[in-house]
Image (cartoon, helix red, strand yellow):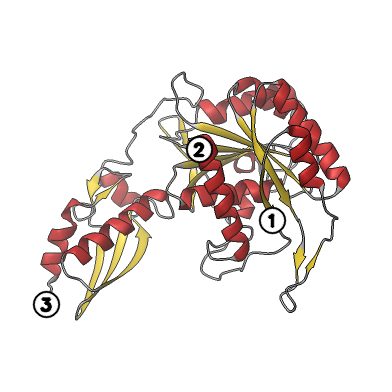
């Protein structure tokens, strides 16, 4: 079957760039069309890439073209220039002015916490957020670990949030909207703020950031039960929590304090993630329990909750085209574990 560029553009007329609320044909977003028999290859420009909306558009284009008889579809994406976006009327401001703290907001807040540092809490937060987005959820993450912010580096984020109409627009990466204290300090400068100023910054993250509609907001809390954790518990009376620990007895003992704080403030504990649970040899498949065993099980018993998953020691496969040193691919063995954990989280929060 022969296709023409004109026919293909006609079929794509109804595909909408969600961030501009305009057809990708009208935005001049169809950059390139190549036809090779029953194979069609497209280069498409969107206002934003690397988002859940891009994934929706990608699936929509593939299904639409295959429905018209195209055998296979190849897609590449790039971003419209700032000049093009301005000429098209700028980004859609749907939901502008809303706060996540407003009554009636349906976002599910999930605080990821630990009793002590160094147990991989931020790695769990990032991969939980990305996995939820891969499952089709609208997800944001606040790097609330004010003194140890690391989420932007973990996700390979180099750009900074934009301020439009006095509202902060978070950075989109892997379909996750990201805000971090790291965006608002110079270089790797230490943060020396105290309680009241930290509380004000956290309130701004909830109230002055243009999150749009979110299914889940992940909060990467600092370890322990200090000022920031207390502020979060006060601001979000209905937050849910995931507690991260290693199998080591001491780590589990300290993590129990974070769990006790959640219970006292009437937060629901979704479950325990046991990180660094073991090391599995690629050569023999043998598991070595480097940090011992049983910590996660003891926490489950003490806090009367569930074990969401055990994550082994490992490192993501680094890709040259996508730099994100702490994000696991969906097909990576550890990435699959995070997908399973995310499915359990969804089941528990329906």
From where the camera sits, is residue 125 visible? yes
Q: Where residue 82 sits: x, y (%)?
A: 36, 50
Count residues near mark 3 (Cα–Cα under 10 Å), then give few for <14, some for 14-19, many for 20+: few
Count residues near mark 1 (Cα–Cα under 10 Å), then give few for <14, some for 14-19, many for 20+: many
Q: Which residue lies under the disc numbered 3?
A: 2
Residue at figure coordinates x 37%, y 30% from the top left: 95
Sooner in the amino-acid sequence: mark 2 or mark 1: 2
Tell me where residue 89 sits by quadrant: top left
Query: Number of numbered discs present?
Result: 3
Q: Which residue lies under the disc numbered 1?
A: 311
Task: Please give left or right for residue 238 compared with residue 150 in the image.
Answer: left
Q: Where residue 253 sits: x, y (%)?
A: 85, 38
Q: Marks 1 and 3: which is nearer the front?
A: 1
Tell me where residue 222 sits by quadrant: top right
Sooner in the amino-acid sequence: mark 2 or mark 3: 3
Residue at figure coordinates x 70%, y 27% from the top left: 262
Residue at figure coordinates x 55%, y 71% from the top left: 320
Q: Are marks 2 and 3 in contact (CB under 8 Å)?
A: no
Mark 1 to mark 3: distance in Å? Answer: 50 Å
Q: Are marks 1 and 3 in contact (CB under 8 Å)?
A: no
Tell me where residue 256 sits by quadrant: top right
Q: Where residue 269 sits: x, y (%)?
A: 66, 33
Task: Please give left or right for residue 331 compared with residue 1 in the image.
Answer: right
Q: Which residue lies under the disc numbered 2?
A: 216
Count residues near mark 2 (Cα–Cα under 10 Å), then give few for <14, some for 14-19, many for 20+: many
């Amino acid at each position: 079957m022969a296709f023409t560029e004109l026919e293909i553009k006609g079929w794509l007329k109804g595909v909408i760039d969600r961030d501009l609320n305009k057809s990708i044909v009208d935005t001049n977003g169809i950059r390139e069309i190549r036809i090779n028999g029953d194979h069609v290859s497209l280069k498409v420009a969107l206002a934003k890439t690397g988002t859940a909306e891009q994934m929706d558009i990608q699936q929509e284009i593939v299904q639409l073209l295959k429905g018209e008889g195209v055998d296979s579809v190849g897609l590449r994406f790039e971003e419209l220039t700032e000049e093009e976006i301005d000429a098209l009327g700028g980004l859609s401001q749907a939901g502008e002015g809303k706060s996540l703290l407003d009554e009636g907001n349906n976002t599910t807040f999930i605080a990821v916490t630990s009793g002590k540092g160094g147990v991989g809490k931020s790695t769990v937060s990032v991969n939980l957020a990305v996995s939820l987005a891969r499952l089709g959820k609208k997800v944001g993450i606040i790097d609330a670990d004010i003194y140890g912010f690391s989420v932007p580096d973990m996700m390979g984020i180099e750009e900074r949030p934009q301020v439009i109409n006095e509202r902060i627009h978070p950075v989109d990466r892997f379909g996750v909207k990201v805000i971090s204290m790291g965006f608002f300090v110079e270089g790797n400068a230490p943060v020396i703020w105290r309680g009241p100023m930290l509380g004000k910054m956290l309130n701004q993250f909830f109230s002055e950031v243009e999150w749009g509609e979110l299914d889940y907001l992940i909060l990467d809390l600092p370890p322990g039960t200090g000022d920031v954790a207390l502020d979060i518990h006060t601001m979000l009376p209905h937050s849910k929590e995931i507690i991260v620990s290693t199998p080591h007895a001491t780590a589990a003992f300290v993590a129990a304090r974070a769990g006790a704080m959640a219970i006292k403030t009437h937060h629901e504990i979704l479950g325990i993630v046991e990180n660094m649970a073991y090391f599995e040899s690629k050569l023999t498949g043998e598991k070595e329990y480097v940090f011992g065993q049983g910590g996660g099980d003891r926490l489950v018993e003490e806090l009367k909750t569930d074990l969401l998953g055990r994550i082994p020691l490992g490192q993501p496969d680094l890709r040259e085209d996508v730099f994100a040193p702490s994000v696991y691919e969906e097909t990576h063995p550890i990435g699959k574990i995070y997908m399973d954990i995310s499915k359990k989280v969804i089941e528990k929060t329906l």
